Amino acid sequence: IAAGVAEHANKALEASQGLTIKGKKSSSIWGGNFKVMSMLFHARAEFLQSQVDRRNRQYGQEIAHLNRAVEMAVEGKEFMKTEGFVKLVDGPTMLGKIPTNLQSLLVNVKQRRKIIIEENTKIYLDKVPSKSDLQKIEGKDVMYYDEEKNSELADSFMPVSLARPMFTTV
């Protein structure tokens, strides 16, 4: 899911750079924040994949994904320091504070990476693949619509049935 969120942020970044939008001041503000959000969620996806590798006892793969997660998180933090980057104070709160999330992810990833590198050197001796040998993590849909069944959504999912009245006109 994290990879899917990162892809969504990339698409939003592309849209914010369109000719009709790019001239507006908010375009660069939102564009920068979408870029950092994309970096955060790509780093999260790498970290989560490293946990899958750990469960599967693929310690070299785990190290490679942790390395990539560190690179992406550091790149996101560095981008936020660039001139012209404006932090949104009223951004998507459901995603949490992006700088805080980047920092805590970086701390966790570095801690795990330090441990697994030491273990791999002394115990597992797994080969760590290069960045170019790692497969790109693709986003996955959590839900999908089966057009062959052509089934309608249940009434409870329709906008008029939602508790908040703003959805009744959708």
Image: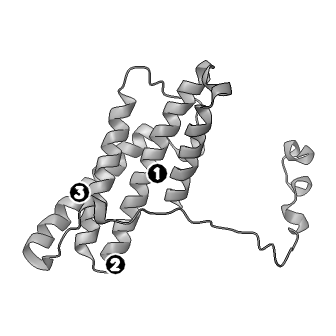
- The amino acid type found where label 1 is placed reads Phe
Location of residue 122 in the rendering, given as x and y in whole percent from the top left corner: 7, 74
Crowd around label 2: few <14 · some 14–19 · many ≥20 (10 Å): few
Q: What residue is rendered at 44% in x and 25% in y?
A: 85
Give the position of the N terminus as an image quadrant: bottom right
In the foreground, 15 or 87: 15
Q: Secondary structure at mark 1?
A: helix
Residue type at the position of mark 3 = Gln
Residue that mark 3 sits on: 111
Above or below 29: residue 48: below
Which of pointers 3 and 1 lies earlier in the amino acid sequence?
1
Residue 101 position in % (x across, y down): 42, 45
Which residue bears the numbered disc 1?
A: 41
Asked if marks 3 and 1 touch (Cβ < 8 Å), the reply is no
Q: Residues within 10 Å of mark 3 (few under 14, many from 20)?
A: few
**Residue 126 left/right relative to 141:** left
Q: Looking at the image, is 46 positioned above or below residue 144? A: above
Q: Which residue is mark 2?
A: 55
Residue 102 location, x and y as percent?
38, 44
Q: How is the image coloured?
A: one colour
Which is more foreground, mark 2 or mark 1?
A: 1
